[in-house]
Amino acid sequence: KVIDENRRILNQQRTLQGKSKISYTHLIGWAIVQAIKDVPAINHAFVEADGEPYRVARTQLNLGVAVDVAGKDGNRSLMVPNIKNAGGLNFSQYTDAFDDIVKRARTGKLQVTDFQGTTVSLTNPGTVGTIASV
């Protein structure tokens, strides 16, 4: 209930400022970013070198955002561009970057670099009718 009310108030203010509304996906992504800032090991990865696993401590958080895109032929595709250095952004910068990456995905204006370096990704399977997911 609290998140619903805070989101409603935030969206009223953003509407008055001519900005886009904040979705639950925005908020969940922001929560992921904040959690990783608190527990940076979540952003680590493992690589294999000389047949042995090594942990890579990533210093930059690039949040991949899954975007459902309709092709010219009507087929749908899932693209996962990322918000570069999401951990270094404030909430306003984050929402602007989030909206920009989604808009560019839906208008076919992404570059290869928009997909490079993703360290963590977020998807929203609820749009395809799931009732439970992790």
Image (cartoon, grey):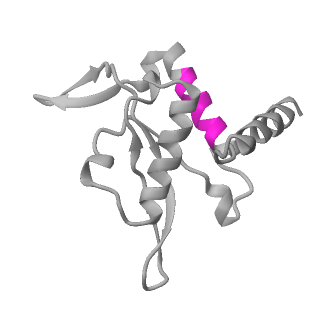
The residue located at (43%, 86%) in the rendering is 73
Where does residue 19 sit, x and y in percent of width and height?
64, 45
Where does residue 132 sit, x and y in percent of width and height?
71, 51
In the image: residue 102, left or right of residue 62: right
The residue located at (70%, 64%) in the rendering is 129
For residue 128, which quarter of the picture? bottom right
Residue found farthest to the left: 50
Using the image as rendered, state which of residue 11 and residue 55 is in the foreground.
11
Q: Quadrant of the C terminus?
A: top right
Q: From where the camera sits, is residue 122 visible? A: no
The residue located at (64%, 48%) in the rendering is 20
Q: Quadrant of the N terminus?
A: top right
* Magenta stretch holds residue 51: no
Residue found farthest to the front: 17
In the image: residue 127, left or right of residue 56: right
Q: From where the camera sits, is residue 75 visible? A: yes
| Residue span colored magenta | 26-35
In the image: residue 26, left or right of residue 101: right
The residue located at (47%, 64%) in the rendering is 106
* Residue 80 versus residue 54 in the image, above or below: below
Where does residue 29 sit, x and y in percent of width and height?
58, 36
Magenta span: helix, strand or loop, mainly? helix
Using the image as rendered, state which of residue 122 and residue 94 is in the foreground.
94
Where does residue 70 sit, x and y in percent of width and height?
49, 73
Residue found farthest to the right: 1
* Residue 58 versus residue 72 in the image, above or below: above
For residue 7, which quarter of the picture? top right
Residue found farthest to the top: 38
* Residue 14 versus residue 109 in the image, above or below: above
In the image: residue 29, left or right of residue 24: left
* Residue 33 versus residue 109 in the image, above or below: above
